[in-house]
Amino acid sequence: MAGYELIVEGILAILLLAFLYYAVMLHRRLGSMRDSKGELEKLINTFADATGRADKSIQGFKATAEQSGRSLQETIDRAQSLRDDLAFLIEKAEGLADRMESGVLAQRSAAPKGAGNATAPRSAPPKQAKAAAPKGAGAAAPNPEQAASSDDGNRVQSKAEQELLKALQSMR
């Protein structure tokens, strides 16, 4: 039995030496981890600070986006209001232009036919049209229909009416 005891004690001694070797290696690694612990804590703190700054930046971006959104919505609301006002004004101007046009046509049809050619006012030279324009009308030459109403002397159109008629006719 002494032989078996010696063999078992030899195996135990080898295992004990292997255990000691791994214990020393574990001790060194744990030591290096303890040394790295300070660096790891610094890294964690730096990461937490960066996360906090990013959170504040995101909140700032959200506030800026909300403010920009409100400002944009106000601008859109004002633009829609202006669009509605312009549509209303255009409707009224078209009605006025139609009434003015029908008045001019009525004046032409009521004009004496023996006085001359019915197409003469339309083909009047620009010099006559300028002479018939009211003072302050500027260099803008009225269209032939305006010249006809001015030549008849029944109604002199204002500059605004002339410009409105010109704009409406150019749209047609």
Image (tube, rainbow, N blue to C red):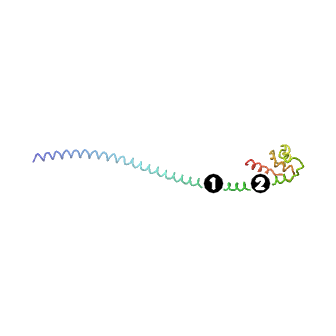
65 left or right of 166 in image = left
Under circle 2, the secondary element is helix
On the image, the x and y values in percent for residue 163 come to 77, 49
Q: Nearer the viewer, mark 1 or mark 2?
A: 2
- Count how many numbered circles sit on residues in the image: 2
Residue 112: which disc? none
Of mark 1 and mark 2, the one earlier in the sequence is 1
On the image, the x and y values in percent for residue 147 come to 83, 48
Residue lying farthest to the front in this orientation = 114
Residue lying farthest to the left in this orientation = 1
12 left or right of 138 in image = left
Q: Quadrant of residue 98?
A: bottom right
Q: Amino acid at mark 1?
A: Ile
Q: Residue at x 28, y 44 (%)?
A: 25
Q: Circle 2 sits on which residue?
A: 98
Q: Residues within 10 Å of mark 2 (few under 14, many from 20)?
A: some
On the image, the x and y values in percent for residue 169 come to 75, 48
Q: Amino acid at mark 2?
A: Asp
Q: Residues within 10 Å of mark 1 (few under 14, many from 20)?
A: few
Q: Residue at x 46, y 51 (%)?
A: 51
Camera-nearest residue between 72 and 167 = 167
Q: Circle 1 sits on which residue?
A: 76
